[in-house]
Amino acid sequence: MSAENRHEQGPALVPFQMYVDKGQQAERYRELATTDQLSGALNRHGLELYLQTAEAPRAMLLADATNFKAVNDEYGHQAGDQVVVETHRLLRASIRPGDVIARWGGDEFVVILNDDSETQKSGSVPVIGEQRMSASPPEEIIVAAKSRISEGVRAFLEDHPGLKEVNFDLAVGGIVWGGAEKIEQLIEQVEDDMKIHKSRQHEAGQHRRAS
């Protein structure tokens, strides 16, 4: 290629490359602004942005790592950080592809359980003939999600005997959501349901340190 041809192509290529670089940079900034850097879940800002465009979520869970302070005291904050990461991973493995997870703060995670129509879009709802299964009632979606999370915790503790010793667990509250209430209002409501779960765990002796 002649120097003349190289000169002619330069001005056309450089602006295009600058455009691509700026686009990638903007996407990276957006990701940093909406993602919790420790767990990889959405952060509060990311959750708020998601809910602005979400189509009528059906239900919400609030998952709280119980005895989390004992983990930090016994094994240090680095271990506590790892528990946060593993909790997000456990929750992600326990819910449907169309559901959304956000770290609300500390050891608390919000899980948005979307309408089955969102799950259908992801292709995870089985097809019967030419018809997809009908949408489940939100109460059933909550119960099913709680059950899968409980199973996930049991499997998780078998692989982490140290956490089992300090009675680590996840307390989970759930609430049906019509889509009108603000997230802060929902958090207050779902915390009441979580307190019931924690109370049952206490009665079962799950939160008492082993002697």
Image (tube, rainbow, N blue to C red):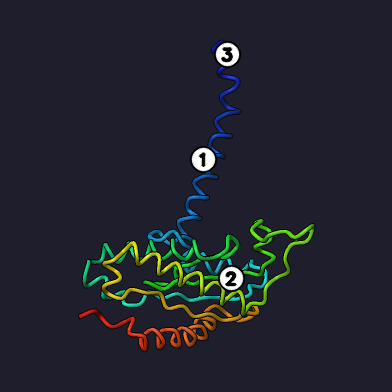
Kindly report which numbered mark, 1 or 2, lies closer to the viewer in this rendering: 2
Give the number of the disc on residue 10: none
Question: In which image quadrant can residue 71 be found?
Answer: bottom left
Q: Which badge, 3 or 1, comes first in the chain's sequence?
A: 3
Q: Amino acid at mark 1?
A: Asp
Name which of mark 3 and mark 2 comes first in the sequence.
3
Residue that mark 2 sits on? 113
Residue 15 is situated, as x and y percent measured from the top left of the image, at 57, 34
Q: Is residue 22 above or below residue 165?
A: above
Specify the amino acid type for callout 2: Leu
Residue sitting at 53 percent across and 80 percent down?
174
Q: Is residue 109 above or below residue 4?
A: below
Density class for disc 1 (Cα within 10 Å; few <14, some 14-19, many ≥20) is few
Q: Which type of secondary structure does the marked residue at label 3 adopt? A: helix
Image coordinates for residue 187, horizontal then vertical, percent? 50, 81
- The tag on residue 21 is 1
Image spot of residue 178 (x, y percent): 65, 79
The residue under the point 46% across, 83% down is: 194
- Residue at the image point whose x is 54% and y is 78% from the top: 183
Front in this rendered view, residue 119 or 56: 119
Secondary element at image label 2? strand
Classify the position of the N terminus by image quarter: top right
Q: State how far apart marks 3 and 2 are (Cα).
A: 60 Å
Report the number of discs.
3
Q: Would you call the spot at circle 3 few (<14 residues within 10 Å), some (14-19), or many (20 or more)?
A: few
Query: Along the line of sight, which residue is nearer the eye, 211 or 94?
Result: 211
The residue where tag 3 is placed is 4
Q: Are discs 1 and 2 less than 8 Å apart at CB? A: no
Task: Give x and y (percent) for residue 66.
Answer: 35, 77
Name which residue type carries label 3. Glu
